[in-house]
Amino acid sequence: MRANQNSKTLSADELKFEELLASGRKIEPRDWMPDDYRKTLIRQIGQHAHSEIIGMQPEGNWITRAPSLKRKAILMSKVQDEAGHGLYLYSAAETLEADRTDMLEKLNNGKMKYSSIFNYPTPCWADMGAIGWLVDGAAICNQVPLCRTSYGPYARAMVRICKEESFHQRQGYEIMLTLCRGSAEQKQMAQDALNRWWWPSIMMFGPRDDKSPNSELSLKWKIKLFSNDELRQKFVDIAVPQANILGLTVPDNDLSWNEETGHYTYGEPDWEEFFEVIQGNGPCNKERVSNRREAHENGQWVRDAAIAYAEKRAKISRPKTTQDPL
Amino acid sequence: MESKKDYPLWEVFIRSNRGIDHKHAGSLRAADAEMALQNARDLYTRRSEGVSIWVVPSNQIIASDPDDKEILFDPSKDKIYRHPTFYSLPDELEHM
Ligand SMILES: [Fe+2]
Ligand SMILES: [Fe+2]
């Protein structure tokens, strides 16, 4: 018999859950799980899904004004991928008995959050480069370990997502590279975009470990596998040499290579700004949510019509599909 | 008033290539079978991951209960003679 901190005896269900976690096997939808495990996952997966959907807006802003047909096609594919990522994740949340309509409503009325990064504006084409390189780059640092997260459907969604992210980052970096090899003005555009996106990207990993109260439980449950600061360090170590290749300067005066630790030392972001953005006071929070709400409301008649059509047709005859024998 | 009705849920199975079984890819929401197929194409085969798609209404899937695991699967555990390695045969017998 094992006992937890309250010296309460674990039930057979709890014991089995703990054993699955300890052995590194996945928890699947129909397994017993603690309420807080379920709630934490719904919150995290839901926020993650919302981030993918809202994340379409800053880049969607440039689809009609991309500098060439090639760039336009690439950007459309990327934004479409982000929609797909959102849908994989809503599906994963639904396996936890979360209601998709309910989650979307909570996004629309501000009761659920999404990543702070998408509340920054994209005034320049170079921002498409900086977002792909840095924002998708930071997302990759976060998401690769999540492929091994303890909840099966979340892990599988992350595997699918990670396969697609590499294209996102490479196309962004290529935009930056092209600008940096262009005229002095173009290189300056790239530098300005890096200046705009560096600190918000650093903040994407969330508060410092000593200010992140939820992290401990998530680590214990193997929902998260690395702490915010560990992931942030990893990102800085990867991104700084990439900036050097572009010939751009990372806007951090405290940045230096630490021979002893084998890592970069970096400065403290403006955490006040971070919490302001999280609270809904970033430069684009209102615009992002109201666009989302408007799109949802304007699409209501389409959804209603599709359902009415499906119901009517189901009454007339069985749906027509090709039979593919086993 | 906004209606809260959502499309029903569908499970998607994809055959990635000829000669391979359809494999569960994930789920999606769609009003009917036709839309489910269209959405499955857009959602799960953007990079030619498939040559054939099945969609099945999620509520049509009958799943075993995890609590029945022992009743269902334990009886086969002690039948080790079902595996070829159970039989020790002379070494000179090749390719068997
Ligand atoms: Fe994404
Ligand atoms: Fe992405």
Image (cartoon, rainbow, N blue to C red):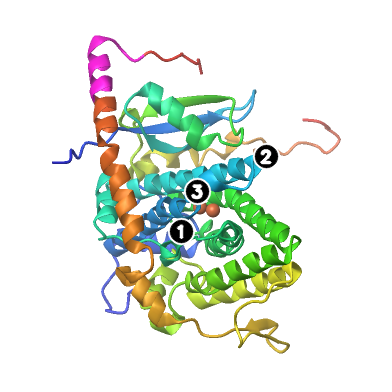
Q: Residue at x 28, y 10 (%)?
A: A317
Q: CA distance from mark 3 to mark 2?
A: 33 Å
In which chain is the residue bearing label 2? Answer: B
Label 2 CB-ligand 1 distance < 8 A = no
Q: Nearer the viewer, mark 3 or mark 2?
A: 3
Q: Chain of mark 3?
A: A
Report the residue marked by disc 2. B85
Same subunit, tags 3 and 2: no
Q: Is residue B34 left or right of residue A297?
A: right
Q: Amino acid at mark 3?
A: Arg
Q: Magenta segment, which residues?
A: A308-319
x then y, percent, for residue A22? 47, 65
Tag 1: amino acid: Ser
Residue A35: assigned label: none
Looking at the rendered structure, which numbered label has been put on residue A150?
1
- Subunit that carries the residue with mark 1: A
Q: Position of residue A48 (x, y in %)?
A: 41, 57
For disc 3, the marked residue is A156
- Residue A318 on the magenta segment: yes
